[in-house]
Image (cartoon, rainbow, N blue to C red):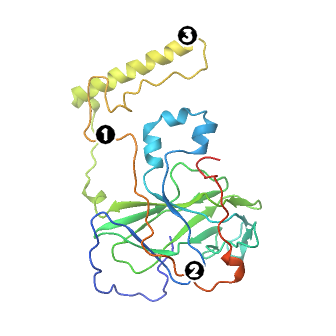
Amino acid sequence: MSLPTTEQPIAPGPQPTATLENSMIAYRIPGWSRYPEIIPAPADREWMDTGTKGWANRCLPLRMANQAGWCILNDTDFDVIWDGKNSLESLKIQALDKSREPIFANSMFGYGILTISIPFLFRMPPLRNLMVRGPANFFKDGAAPLEGLVEADWTPYTFTMNWKITRTGLPIRFAGGEPICMLTPVPRGDLNQFHGEIRNLQSEPELLAGYTTWHQQRVAREKERIEAASTQRQGVQGHYIRGQGYLGEGGSGHQTKLSLKPFIVAEPPIFGQPPASNLTSIPATNKRWWRK
């Protein structure tokens, strides 16, 4: 995360008018020649579909985490090369299409950190933060996303998304259409209210019985696989997916998918006066980062 975009501390002005309880507004920052797309994060990931032949999709907690936010998509292809030094000039950003420069990508901090400017100022309801992070369960060889927590209910400051380059001397590809960051609302102060304790599972007999039954079933299935001398994965029994324990346990409000609402365009964009090369429209494509 970047510091506020001003060098001098600015006292917050009058509190903004309270927005609707569940609203999230992305105000376009003036002066940009284009604005990236914001989408609800999908459940699918290419590596889950192809790299594991679909088996990873059987993990419901994994797929739920995939969907837990909105993604801002990179809008052009570019490579980043870091020479391993700490200066701003040590990070090189190379456009793959000279007619569409990566106008949001820059070297702002040094130390091999790629900074992505986010051309929106977000406004959340009172006491709501935005977790700004890399897309869940999405991997990029040679780059690791940095995370930040923004008080987006009052701040007049923008923020940036930052990636730490971890491999020197070789180009790291940031492809158009792939997620550049993920946004997840977080109620402020909720974490402070939790009190952690460490106890023995034997102190909760019913919970211990449920765990023991599940564990025995799992061990038995693994034994069957070994005795069959098979390397084929065993099918899942689906208790968690159905929101059930082996002894009939169940929670309220069990979810098997998230249905985040897309951002709607309430106002048309007002573009700045960029160089002609920046006016190129986004190429039409059916490819998406979650499925190539």
Quadrant in the picture for residue 100:
bottom right
Q: Earlier in the sequence, mark 1 or mark 3?
A: 3
The residue located at (47%, 42%) in the rendering is 62
Q: Nearer the viewer, mark 1 or mark 2?
A: 2
Q: CA distance from mark 2 to mark 3?
A: 63 Å
User: Few, some or many C-alpha atoms within 10 Å of disc 3 (few <14, some 14-19, many ≥20)?
Assistant: few
* Residue 183 spot, x, y in % from top left: 45, 61
Task: Give the mark nearer the N terminus: 2 vs 3.
Answer: 2
| Residue 227 badge | 3
Q: Residues within 10 Å of mark 2 (few under 14, many from 20)?
A: some
Residues at marks 1 and 3 touching, judged by CB atoms closer than 8 Å = no
Q: Depth check: 77 or 164 in front?
A: 77
Kindly report the distance in space between the C-alpha atoms of the residues bearing marks 1 and 3: 36 Å
Query: Which residue is denoted by mark 2 in the rendering?
Result: 32
State left or right for residue 268 relative to residue 194. right
Q: Marks 1 and 2, how far apart in space?
A: 42 Å
Q: Nearer the viewer, residue 239 or 287?
A: 287
Residue that sits furthest to the top in the current view: 227
Q: Pick the residue in front: 2 or 195.
A: 2
Measured as percent of width and height from the top left, residue 266 is found at 42, 72
| Disc marking residue 254 | 1
Task: Give whichever of discs 1 and 2 has the lower sequence position.
Answer: 2
* Residue 143 image offset from top left, x and y in percent: 63, 58
Q: Nearer the viewer, residue 36 or 112?
A: 36
Q: Is residue 79 left or right of residue 60?
A: right
Element at label 2? loop
> Total of numbered circles in the picture?
3
Q: Nearer the viewer, mark 2 or mark 3?
A: 2
Question: Quick check: 109 above or below 284?
Answer: below
Answer whether labels 1 and 2 touch (C-beta < 8 Å).
Answer: no
Q: Which amino acid, mark 1?
A: His
